[in-house]
Amino acid sequence: MLAVTSLYGIDLLGDNVAACRARLGAVVNEAHKALFSEALPDVANSAIAYILSQNVVQGDALSFRTTDGGAIILPEWSPLNGQMLKRRDFRFDHLLEHQRVQSLPLFSDLGEEVYLPEPVRDYRPCHFLHVAQQEVAT
């Protein structure tokens, strides 16, 4: 599941996006079957399909826009306590910006300024099998 949460893609063509999601899902299923000699449970397949639907999106990576003109949004999935995932959504164009941090100076170990993008949505932590049902945090 952690490997799937770290896969991302953006493509202009919807059929390429669908094919990519299907191929990645098949690779995960084949790897699971090779390790455990059985297919992934349906609930795990659903969670993987949902994560891929959020991580592999249709849009123009050069203009940072979806086909309907909206901003491309990509989620960050952080593992918590072994079986929980925390999701935060970020605008793709903001992830590539390197604006100066306007608050107290933050520096890397090398003395360089650090860029911390702001999430556009923040979700409650949930069990990794229930990511499709998670709610936006208040």
Image (cartoon, grey):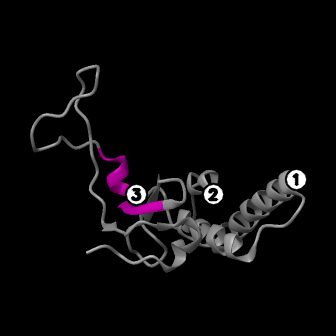
Residue type of the residue flagged with mark 3: Phe
Q: Name the residue beneath numbered marker 1.
A: 34
Dot 2 alpha-carbon crowd within 10 angstroms: few under 14, some 14 to 19, many 20 or more? some
- Say which residue appears at 55% left-offset and 67% top-offset: 57
Say which element carries label 1.
helix
Across and down, in percent, residue 122 comes to 33, 67
Label whose residue precedes the other's in the sequence (3 or 2)? 2
Name the amino acid, label 2: Met
**Picture residue at 32% right of the left edge, 54% below the top:** 94
* Mark 1 vs 2: CB contact within 8 A: no
- Give the secondary structure at mark 2: loop
Part of the protein shown in magenta: 85-97
The Cα atoms of the two marked residues, 1 and 3, are separated by 35 Å
Total marks shown come to 3
Q: Quadrant of residue 130?
A: bottom right
The quarter of the image holding the N terminus is bottom right
Magenta region includes residue 82? no
Residue 95 within the magenta-colored segment of the rendering: yes
The residue positioned 61% from the left and 66% from the top of the image is: 52
Q: Which residue is mark 3?
A: 92
Give x and y (percent) for residue 41.
Answer: 76, 72
Q: Which residue is mark 2?
A: 1
> Residue 64 — which label?
none
Secondary element at image label 3:
helix
The image shows residue 34 at horizontal and vertical percentages of 88, 53
Name the side, left or right, on which 41 lies relative to 67.
Answer: right
Q: Earlier in the sequence, mark 1 or mark 3?
A: 1
